[in-house]
Amino acid sequence: MLANVHIPVGISTENCLSWSPDGELAIAAGEEVYILLPHHSDTEPWTHVRIPVNTFTNQEWPWQEQTSFKDMAIGEEQAKVTIVAVAWSPSGLGKYRRSVLAVLTSNLLLSLWTSFSDSADPESWERVLIVNDALIYPSHKTTEARIRPSQRVRSMAWAPACELHVDRETPFSERKWGNFMMAITDDNNGIHIAKITSPFLGAFTSWDAQSLCYNRPSINRRPIKRASLLSLVMNEQYSIDDIRFGEWNTTGDVAIVYSCRGIQYQGWLSILLGSPLEAILQTDSGDDFLQPLHEVLPTSPFSVIPPFQAKIENQKEKYWVESSRGEDIVAKTWGIAHFRGLQAVCITLHPSMMFEYTAPGEDSAVVLFDNGTDNESTEDQFPWQVPPEVDENRAHRQILDSIFHFPQSNSFPLSNLDIKIIYGAVYVTMLINDLDRLQLIPAILQCLDLLEVRSGVDLEAEAAVINDLQVAVPTPKIVRQIAERRIQAILGSGWPDMPLLDSCPICSSEYGPEAIIYFDSLKDAYCPQNHPFARCSLTFLPILEPGLSKQCLGCGRGYVNESLHPEIAQQLMSPELTPSLANLLFDKWDTCPYCGGKYCD
């Protein structure tokens, strides 16, 4: 049985849960988003983060003139802002290929939030985009009365990832993780399809939303048997209150299901890949509606979801004992979310036979989890609490193949950093398993010849040792001998312009070339004076300065942070003009090559 989570917040919407592809669980809690972050530990599975989202700058939410009563929206007039809906994007839109959180608030503004460093730090979360500004389609750029309703968001949903849109073969492709699109409904009962871009997608330099297409479907009006003034007005005031995506089919189309007044309708979205991206949205005529929404998904807040019935009864019993408010307890459910075979449901508990009064600070909710097992006697672990399976040999071989292939497939000049990475890969082959090393020897010798020509450094000593490895097994002594021969070459010819091995920044001024950091390990690096440094698990370069590293959230391996490294960051500014090996490596493995986990500063 998975452990429950008690959270000290009040829930503000009936569909309050959203689970990201990385396991982050967002909960709509009034004026803030309460996020449960996966904690890779045997003891505590979650890290709790609270992010206030109820404040806006004048630029984000500008002052507007009062509109007519017909076009007025109550949400725009209220000073208090609460959350209406939350939804995580597919992986790849945010930094380090994380998901981005969409938050719809009661003032009808849709904003995107993301963390730029450690997600567990509330200060790292920022609002990066207000999507409403993009919701002006040319067909209704007429009057203020039509523009303002089209910029009020009533509901939204992210399109699921589509493999047909993914381009992993082209370096620095903006579609490496696909296209990121949202379906958004407005106060005109129209449906926008918007494309979202970020600075982490290829050539894009800023966060932006672009409306691809717009459709205003016809909605059936309810027949009124005994008309009154109020019923006539309410029959004219209706909006699409929910919208969802289906799954992409093999032709690149996806179903869109939207509902109004409990009746569900269906449309189809077709995407035409190209530059620019095009979208076609077809909706029902209004007569071809589907079944009522409650027959497809339970929407009643008091409905009991079968796998959780026993867990909810258990929570009722605990609440009765702790609160002393009588035996008649009702559980209110606030949404359900799914993640890799897990289900989560959020509930609140209330007395049913008396009035209930609580101060805002006394609000609380419980998130229940179910993994499909009936064993309640033992406490199960969440998927991220189990160490990931890592095939180091396979990862090393893939990385080395890419490194040795680079100088053979590119004729432009190699940078100092590229030469260091390629030369370091020669040492890496002497520290991996025998089979992979023997298979890589021809590529290594060819690479050393190219390095001699393109760097002007004599590498005969290294080539001789590599040739001997076809019949001998490398030992730490042989690896150290190569480095010592390199030191002697440096001492004989003077300090070269392109040193092949890094030197210790602490003692290089005193010892000069003899302060070279030896390549004895794939994880750690030491200079002759035993100053310790960590090695990047992708480039295998030593990380010589603090604050220039990132790590994998899954297996904990360390890497150079390419956005902070002076040489790599400079090359990243224009990868299409000056492609480098470091750029290509970090673009190809934008997630951990060992376990597939996401990075974190």
Image: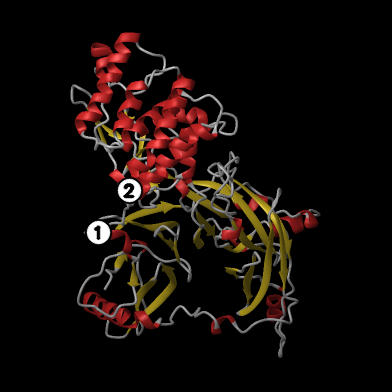
Quick check: marks 2 and 1 in contact, CB under 8 Å?
no
Please say if 577 is above or below 333.
above
The image shows residue 374 at horizontal and vertical percentages of: 28, 80
Disc 1 target residue: 44
Which of the two marks, 2 or 1, is nearer to us in this view?
2
User: Residue 440 falls in which quadrant of the image?
Assistant: top left
Could you tell me which residue is drawn at 75 percent across and 76 percent down?
285
Residue 265 visible, this orientation: yes
Q: Residue type at mark 1: give it.
A: Glu
Q: Residue type at mark 2: give it.
A: Asn
Which image quadrant: the C terminus? top left
User: Residue 510 falls in which quadrant of the image?
Assistant: top left
Could you tell me which residue is drawn at 41 percent across and 36 percent down?
442
Real-space Cα distance between discs 2 and 1? 31 Å
Could you tell me which residue is drawn at 72 percent across and 71 percent down?
283
Residue 547 visible, this orientation: no
- Could you say whether the residue bearing mark 1 is in a helix, strand or loop? loop
Disc 2 target residue: 393
